[in-house]
Image (tube, grey):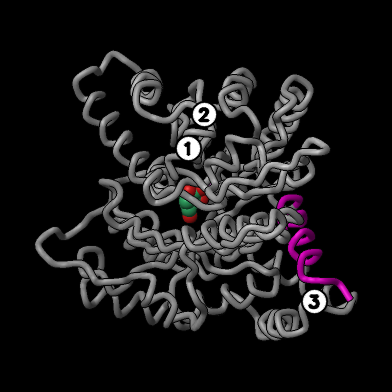
Amino acid sequence: MVPTWRLRAAFARRLSDMYGSEVPAYTTLLDVAGEVNHEVMRENADAERLGGIDRITAERHGAIRVGTPLEMGQAAQIFAAFGMYPVGFYDLRDATFSAVPVISTAFRPIDAVELARNPFRVFTSLLTTADRRFFDADLQDRLERFLSRRELFTPELLDLARRAERDAGLPHEQAERFLALAVVAFKLSAEPVDRTWYAELERVSAVAADIGGVSSTHINHLTPRVLDIDLLYQRMAARGIAMIDDVQGPPRWDGPDVLLRQTSFRALAEPRKFREPDGSVTTGSLRVRFGEVEARGIALTPAGRALYDELVTETDLRSADHPHVTRQDLARSIWQARFPGDERRLLTERLAYFTYQPATRPPGDRRQPPADVDGLLADGWITAHPIVYEDFLPRSAAGIFQSNLTGEGTRNATVGGAHYDARWLTETIERPVHDPFELYAAQQDESLALTLRALGLTV
Ligand code: OOG
Ligand code: NI
């Protein structure tokens, strides 16, 4: 029997091998990321504070986009077989000035043991075909008819996924078959693209064309994790790979790493077959697969996240007044002034999540432990360890979409948009969409309860 986590690790590895063989710049990215991680490990004794090097080396996230609630439910079934569950709800429709008509969630492992084994996650977006700002009634109708005729996932793949979920793994031979079918389902298809249909959707939104203009889905990027993203950025540039202008998320600064920092290179033009209006097949090109890399930091509580969002807004406001200063520099000075500069303050101000462990006591110590967490920490009864952020940032996600769009698309601002939320998604895919804050808080509370019990204290 191949257990769930081994299926997940193999899936991540095989997708990475497939992507590397088809998108050579991704292989360069992996080489540079490996080089940087090796150097940081050698120079920084704390390098593994937010995850062991084995986890970090294997760590990837990917992204796919689907067109219908049915396809979203099927994707959820396939990911469930790998122990990956929907976490978070992201509405990217209003996040940029370009037309990005999708709502998203991320499929990932949800408990600490599984995350440590292999944290593979897939950011999955669903086209909002009912949103009148993008699709009028006639286009919605033709789009939904097109989507209902295609099959992203074969019945055999879905059947194996159901079995893998039910039995928490698959016998060796079936596991092999399941993995092979799953990887093919996320590979870029060689099917000719209908030129007229693709172009019609592209006028509305390049994202709509990428999803609804073709007959399959594909991994559009696969992101490794790096321990020093600024160093990686310089090295990639030195190798001649043009990166986007900035590293998104928090700035580089003297305090603790929090949340998520990401940067990317634009999709490269890849040859694709097109079916022309006269029925002939020609070769053209499309830019749909790109590269991204990320550094992860500590998970923030709602209060910490609110402070983070406030500093983003302040950076926006100030950069409008100081066009000559880089966003990174501006953000850094704001952070140095306003964000807690060490882990202990993040903890005592309840801005970030931690797990707790009882500390080893000096022999012969007869004192009674204090009854509160801050006192226990201050007097050395317990230690705290930061919880790593496992999710995404809507603004960075929108930036990733944005940096790969050729045109801005069109949007009818005179009509209202359709409403989608986490509850709708839960009902649609018939699986709970987890709240990331609740997952981090549960992990923190559980470790605190165990720690207090070990000290003979009540919760
Ligand atoms: C997904 C973009 C979001 C991230 O890292 O924020 C994402 C997409 O382009 O489909 O992957
Ligand atoms: Ni990404």
- Magenta region's main secondary structure? helix
Question: Residue 308's spot in the image, x, y percent?
Answer: 37, 39
Question: Residue 99's spot in the image, x, y percent?
Answer: 29, 53
174 or 281: nearer the viewer: 174
Give the labeled residue for mark 3: 169
Question: Residue 457's spot in the image, x, y percent?
Answer: 63, 58
User: Is residue 241 rendered to the left or right of residue 177?
Assistant: left
Tell whether label 1 touches label 2 (CB within 8 Å).
yes
Closer to the eye: label 2 or 3: 2
Question: Can residue 42 be seen from the camera position used here?
Answer: yes
User: As shown in the figure, which amino acid type bears the numbered disc 2?
Assistant: Asp
Q: Which residues are magenta?
A: 1-17
Quadrant housing the C terminus: bottom right
Closer to the eye: label 1 or 3: 1
Q: Residue 342: give its label.
A: 2
Query: Residue placed farthest to the front in the image?
Result: 366
Q: Is mark 2 within 8 Å of ligand 1?
A: no
Q: Residues within 10 Å of mark 2 (few under 14, many from 20)?
A: few
Q: Residues within 10 Å of mark 3 (few under 14, many from 20)?
A: many
User: Is residue 188 rendered to the left or right of residue 182?
Assistant: left
Give the labeled residue for mark 1: 346
7 or 98: nearer the viewer: 7
Gap between marks 2 and 3, in whole Å?
42 Å
User: As shown in the figure, which amino acid type bears the numbered disc 3?
Assistant: Gly
